[in-house]
Amino acid sequence: MELVTPSIGLVFWTTISFICLLILLRKFAWKPILGAIHEREQSIDEALNKAELAKQEMARLTSQNQDLMQQARAERDEILKEAKTLKDGILNEAKKQAQVEGAKLIEKAKIEIENQKKAALAEVKDQVSSLSLEIAERVLRTQLDDKTKQEALVANLLKDVELN
Amino acid sequence: MDCNQVLVSKVKKVIVVFTLLIAFLSIKIDTFAQADSAVVPVDSAVAKTAEAVSGEHGAVEHDEKKFEPTEVIMEHIADSHMWHLWGHTSLPLPVILYTNGGLEVLSSGNFHHGEHDYTGKYNTYRLEEDHVKVVGADGKIDEEASVLDFSITKNVAAMFVAILVILIVFISVAGAYKKRVGKAPKGLQSFIEPIVIFVRDDIAKPNIGHKYAKFMPYLLTTFFFILFNNIFGLIPIFPGGANVTGNIALTFVMALGTMIIVNINGNKYYWKHIFKPDVPLWLYPIMIPVELIGIISKPFALMIRLFANITAGHIIVLSLISLIFIFETLAIAPVSVAFVLFMDVLELLVAFLQAFIFTLLTALFIGMAVEEHH
């Protein structure tokens, strides 16, 4: 029976010391501990939220980057294509022009050759005529050395004139 | 539940505690052996040990050959004016008496284990079965004399030690929080924090609801006060070994605290539930007394539960140790020690469990008292 009879002394001391313990711990232990835990939990929550936001931002940026890349690639392809067509055009143009130019040159050359040929021919003709004149003069001179022959020629010439 | 998590994550520390327990157990046996050689030179080792223990536990039993386990165990379970250290050495504790004459303070060493009477300012006192009694003029105990015993007994002293340890631990942990603001817990802090969070998230919040913050100091103090006293009770040597939480006076105060907190914070719904329950009017004569009894019976159950659990644990451990002296053979010692080890481990669980249950039920009762009905 003694075991289940609370003794006044222990009740008294337990009451006093428990109340003291409660007051002391509340002021010096529970307040700072619970406060710090609460604060830390909040900061962790905040950090997690921020991380989530950063992740979303990151994803957004990545997709944006991807878009930009795609766009850039398309643009590059476009430019390349354009460049190619331009190059082809220029080449063709150049070729054509070259052909035309060549043809012109050939034409000119032909004309030149013709002219040269004509000039050469004319010169040749001149030379031939003067040569033949000279030859004729010399022939005539030799033939007309004596008087009789001269008189015969004149008579001949006069005969012709008379005919006219 | 989180309880498991806490236990699992601290397995290391628990192992350390187990190791310490084993160490303490071996010391306990050592103490017996020492007392053994110091007390009587007898022929058989068995008889020696048996007598040594009876000598150790009760100074009066010197002549007795027979070992009385009940006596020894009850003496350990009950409170005492001396704090037994080892062999024949006990720590005398202050005796504070409130007599009809006034306050009287003396040392329990004056009684010489009850062999001498002590004459104080107002009366002559005698220590009989560890109770201070007034001795009348005729040399017999005066049962009529009213004397209130406010002594610092073994339990009070052990409680003070536990309180000191609690204060040191928690104030240093609080200091660590102030020093390491916003950082991860470290050392003792990381051992205490999961328990504090466990009390908050698994005991207070689900049972009390959003008003839990107001009750946190009480719940935490109750939890750690019971836990530390339970654990100190498991340590067989000084400054542990006192059956503090297994004493009805302490559990009475704790339960009374819960009852006061619950009823002070009871809102109108709580009182309406007691005095105007939703039952037909003719049931009121039954319901109201039942509800009123309920106010008392809830904390009463708390009181008995803690007291009985801890006392039972102490009794089992002591009984198992007593087996050695009942069988009067050292051969039983390994069996006893093995069982005691098992029981101590179980008691360690019970120490946590009872602290948890007391706090949980307190939170539950508070929750019932502050609950808002819609």
Image (cartoon, helix red, strand yellow):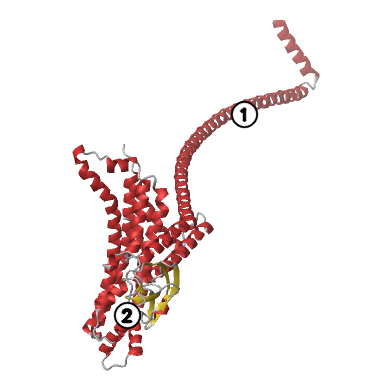
The reply to whether residue A72 is in sight is yes
Residue B184 in view in this figure: no
Residue B277 vs B336, above or below: the answer is: above
Report which residue position mark 2 lands on: B57
- Residue identifier under label 1: A109
Residue at figure coordinates x 35%, y 86% from the top left: B34
Q: Which mark is residue B79?
A: none
The quarter in which the C terminus of chain B is drawn is top left
Q: Chain of mark 2?
A: B
Percent x, y of residue A4: 28, 65
Q: Amino acid at mark 1?
A: Ala
**Residue B318, x across and y down, in percent:** 28, 75
Q: CA distance from mark 2 to mark 1?
A: 144 Å
SS for dot 2: helix
Residue B317 image offset from top left, x and y in percent? 28, 73
The chain that hosts pointer 1 is: A
Dot 1 surroundings within 10 Å: few (below 14), some, or many (20 or more)? few
